[in-house]
Image (spheres, rainbow, N blue to C red):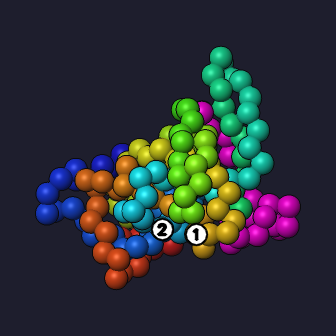
Amino acid sequence: MVEAPRRGPELPVAGWREWIHLPELGLGPLVAKLDTGARTSALHAEGLAFFERDGQRHVRFSVPLAGRRPCVLASDGACPTVEALVRGHQRVRNSGGIDSDRVLIETPCRLGAWTFPIQLTLVSRARMQLPVLLGRRALGGRVWVDSARAFALSSRR
């Protein structure tokens, strides 16, 4: 895993949106919004189902890859099912000021040449433009965000 530098002016400059990969979840490329105004990161997920494996709580969910179409309307292969270890729950206030408890998972994220661990809450982002939001906890000390640029660090590959 190539970790992005943690401090200083040598931090890479990212755009307000970037292509990312979540390799342990088998997801990517996905377009993510890099949002320094949000503390917590979020992944669009549908059909959350909880189960136990080896005495630990896991969650199974679907991620629509065909834009904002719900999985029930998606074509084959456009909505992979993913499983992840539940790390806990996070109380999050959305942009409309509404609090909710969300499932929290942890996974590596690849952005450009760097891979680093992030925590993601699982939520419906069907009304949002992009399926992933990376907040300050994921970005802090790893990249500078230039809001005038897009795809500064990443390509679709």
Residue furthest to the front: 97
Relative placement, left or right, of 12 versus 46 is: left
Question: Separation of disc 2 and disc 1 at Cα?
Answer: 7 Å
Asked if the residues shown at circle 2 and circle 1 are in contact, with their CB atoms under 8 angstroms apart, the answer is yes
Residue annotated with mark 1 = 130
Q: Is residue 141 above or below residue 49?
A: below
Query: As shown in the figure, which amino acid type bears the numbered disc 2?
Result: Lys
Q: Is residue 12 above or below residue 93?
A: below
Of residues 128 and 100, the one nearer the viewer is 100
Q: Position of residue 56 (x, y in %)?
A: 63, 22
Residue at image x 35%, y 77%? 147
Of residues 36 and 96, the one nearer the viewer is 96
Q: Which residues are magenta?
A: 65-86
Q: Is residue 83 visible?
A: yes
The disc label shown at residue 33, or none: 2
Residue furthest to the left: 9
Q: Position of residue 75 (x, y in %)?
A: 83, 68
Residue furthest to the top: 55
Q: Is residue 15 above or below residue 123?
A: below
Of residues 102 and 44, the one nearer the viewer is 102
The disc label shown at residue 90, or none: none
Residue at image x 42%, y 65%? 34
Relative placement, left or right, of 102 versus 37 is: right
How many numbered discs sit on the rendered protein?
2
Residue at image x 14%, y 57%? 8
Residue at image x 57%, y 36%? 89
Query: As shown in the figure, which amino acid type bears the numbered disc 1?
Result: Leu
Q: Please identify the quarter of the rendering in which residue 91 is found.
A: top right
Label 2: element kind: strand
